[in-house]
Image (cartoon, rainbow, N blue to C red):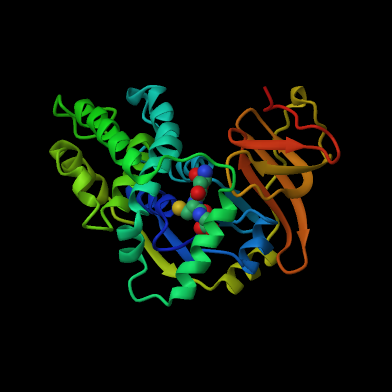
Amino acid sequence: MSDLILHHYAGSPFSEKVRLVLGFKRVTWKSVTVPMMLPKPDVIALTGGYRRAPFLQIGADIWCDTPLMCRVIDQLAPQPPLYPGAAGGVQNVIAQWADTTLFWTAIPYTMQPAGLQHIFAGAPPEVVKAFIADRAAMTAGMKRPGAADAKAHLASYFGWLERELSDGRPFLCGSAACIADFAVAQSPWYIRRVPSVATVLAPFPRLLAWFERVREFGHGTYETMTSGDAIGVARAATPVGPLSFDDGQGFARGDEVTVTPTDYAQDPVAGRLVGLAHDEVAIERDDERAGRVVVHFPRIGYRLKKPDTTSAGLTA
Ligand SMILES: N[C@@H](CCC(=O)N[C@@H](CS)C(=O)NCC(=O)O)C(=O)O
């Protein structure tokens, strides 16, 4: 396998989801630490504007958004399978719920004043202020429950998961771990960073035992790399391709387009469309520092648009 480079940071739950998948696969990878807030010039050199963490790089190809990154990792290292047939299609449904509803309940709950204080213990006040301003701008217009509502919602959500495990199964969808386990695990992982808020998990012993099983997969084997070196790797490589193209979505190969998250951190990434499928969109861009790179996004959760047109594909 070519060098697999994960751009991430220690305190990021979505990064932890992917680190655990890499551990499950027993993969060897390179680790680049990215900043937890803007500015992120070395990130933007590779992604073209996508600022969220983590993202995956192999040579001059960049994969954004963890559901797509997990699929790529599973293709590169098929054993053990991340999408075992025995877990059924519901594994993806649970994973998507965990990446959205569960995550956006766990975050406001954990980031209540006591949690924020714990996570930023020892940090200068201006860093905390800058972080709060960064996240407020990133999530402007997004509706989230407050801490008290989130605590009540979590009691229901963790109760559902506890019941799922009540027949003694070791993992959420059966005897083997699957994508659902890793997507769910990031939320208790984040909550457990703050002992005073982690009490919300106490009534769920099966869930806690399950979490330990997932945690035991570890993070695989990795070596650190600088972001400058990762940009050098991209510059020296040629993007993989050609990629398949679905003509039925109203776009042509080579169209100038933007790809933008539909939920938060809505920074458009501009480029030439080089790949399109029902589950993936890829654009090619030329960067002053990284050279020619292809940036891949999942189709779900992203708006694909030609300049000066209304969005296509995802509007209701
Ligand atoms: N849907 C994205 C969500 C990623 C996400 O929200 N990551 C958080 C960190 S866990 C983030 O990027 N926060 C802003 C930042 O780190 O700049 C995915 O699955 O990768």
Looking at the picture, does residue 233 appear above or below residue 189?
A: below
82 w.r.t. 240: above or below: above
The spot of residue 236 in percent (x, y) is 69, 66
Image coordinates of residue 294 in percent, x first then y, are 69, 51
In terms of depth relative to the viewer, which is nearer, 11 or 174?
Answer: 11
Is residue 3 visible in the rendered structure shown here?
A: no
Compared with 198, 313 (above or below) is: above
Q: Is residue 262 left or right of residue 258?
A: left
Q: Residue at x 67, y 50 (%)?
A: 267
Residue 114 at what x, y percent from top left? Answer: 30, 59
**Residue occupying image coordinates x 54% and y 64%:** 37
Q: Image quadrant of residue 285?
A: bottom right
In the rendered image, which quarter contains the C terminus?
A: top right
Total marks shown come to 0
x, y percent for residue 117: 33, 65
Residue lying furthest right in this view? Answer: 308
The front one of 162 and 299 is 162
- Residue at 45 percent across and 63 percent down: it is 9
Is residue 258 visible in the rendered image? The answer is: yes
Classify residue 159 by image quadrant.
top left
Q: 97 left or right of 314?
A: left
Instruction: Give above or below for 286 relative to 279.
Output: below
